[in-house]
Image: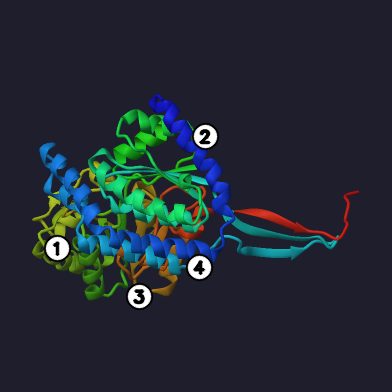
Amino acid sequence: MSVAEQIRTIAAEARQASFAMAKLSSAVKNELLLDMAHGLVNNCEQIIAENKKDLEAGKERGLSTAMLDRLMLNEVRIKGMADAIREVAALPDPVGEVTGMWKRPNDLMVGKMRIPLGVIGIIYESRPNVTSDAAVLCLKSGNAVVLRGGSEAIHSNLAIAEILKAELAKRNIPAAALSLIPFTEREGVTEMLKQEEFIDVIIPRGGESLIRFVVENSKIPVIKHYKGVCHIFVDATADFDMARDIIINAKVQRPGVCNALETLLIHKDVAERFVPFIFQALSEQKVEVRGDEEFRRFAPQAGAATEEDWYAEYLELILAARVVDDMDAAIDHINRYCSLHTESIITGDYGNAQRFIREVNSGVVMVNASTRFSDGNQLGLGAEIGISTTKLHSFGPMGLTDLTTTKFIVYGSGQVRS
């Protein structure tokens, strides 16, 4: 078969398998996931052997040290993957939950019930742990899943998927409930994005170029996350020590992730005292600061920010900084330049905190906390399938519930419409 025919077959079989997944009880799904975790640990040597093939190929292709580290699996990381599966198994099952019920004047009882989305397509890069993370989140929420990992991790991904699929077979669950596209041609992605008859939603996980390619070529709805341009606003009532600790954590702890701080906004009433204070703290952490004219008036050693800096997702130890006149100016800046990911205010004023939460338009809005908490696990979701920066049908970190939708359920006692 051609690549197009193979992809269509995989997608069609996943659609059929989704009907079986939707009927599984919570107990069966949890037992399945626990056995999958056990299978990864028991087959650790096999996974590592396949992973070595990817690492050797990556070195030949000249992948960076950072990329190779993201690609590498060892016993500790595989145990971590198994632990993550167990955490998902322990989460409440959203499928079948009735989210509301109300009585109509004609005595009809109307409600909404959570159901799986159906078939979820995941397109991702580099990290082979995404194979197990994405698979078990989709399966626990009653969906079938079609995975397409990056070519740099093909051997690792295939090994992990086969181990997980073996547990499906033991329970006579259709193997197509978990499908991994077994070839690396780019055509596989473009054909996958045409399968709107069988795949309900596409979730891309990777760099901005991958996500833009998926959005531009997909006939299927896409949950997008282009980048994370995260802001912190230091209000005039902020505690300076608290602000320093939060800003350093948000920028420095892991600068290469999407929930790291990229732009700092400072109220003009505290700029004269706070700018030199925070500039010194950032400089001690080797952070390059690019400030506007007012910021540089109090920290002349800072570089000059350009218009492009306000849009930038640096993913390294670089930070844009601006002094703003008031909360209005801070909120206007954020809503103009943000990527709808995560924003935080440092303030001692309850009213300002509440206003910031109401008026800032991003998926996660925080008060007196580091943007690094914008993560499914940290927010109590147990795990996340990704972070949505678009509002349909989910916004912000996506957990199990976000892999479901709702249908109306109606109970009558013989009513007919007149």
Q: Nearer the viewer, mark 3 or mark 4?
A: 4
Tag 3 secondary structure: loop
- Mark 4 vs mark 2: which is more N-terminal? 4
User: Where on the picture, by quarter, is residue 370?
Assistant: bottom left
Q: Nearer the viewer, residue 315 or 246?
A: 315
Asked whether, in this view, residue 202 is left or right of residue 133, the answer is: right
Work out how far the residue at label 3 is from the one at label 2, CA to CA, in angstroms: 50 Å
What residue sits 26% from the left and 38% below the top?
Answer: 151
Q: Nearer the viewer, mark 4 or mark 1?
A: 4
- Mark 3 vs mark 4: which is more N-terminal? 4
Asked whether, in this view, residue 267 is left or right of residue 296, the answer is: right
Work out how far the residue at label 1 is from the one at label 2, CA to CA, in angstroms: 48 Å
Label 2 Cα crowd, 10 Å radius (few <14 / some 14-19 / many 20+): some
Q: Position of residue 283 (x, y in %)?
A: 10, 62
Mark 4 belongs to which amino acid? Answer: Pro
Q: Which residue is mark 4?
A: 92
Q: Position of residue 118 (x, y in %)?
A: 54, 47
- The image shows residue 10, relative to residue 387, as above or below, that is above
- The image shows residue 342, relative to residue 59, as above or below, that is below
Q: Which mark is residue 118?
A: none
Asked whether, in this view, residue 329 is left or right of residue 269, the answer is: right
Q: Which mark is residue 282?
A: 1
Q: Position of residue 119 (x, y in %)?
A: 50, 45
Tag 4 secondary structure: loop
Q: Which mark is residue 196?
A: 2
Work out how far the residue at label 3 is from the one at label 1, CA to CA, in angstroms: 22 Å
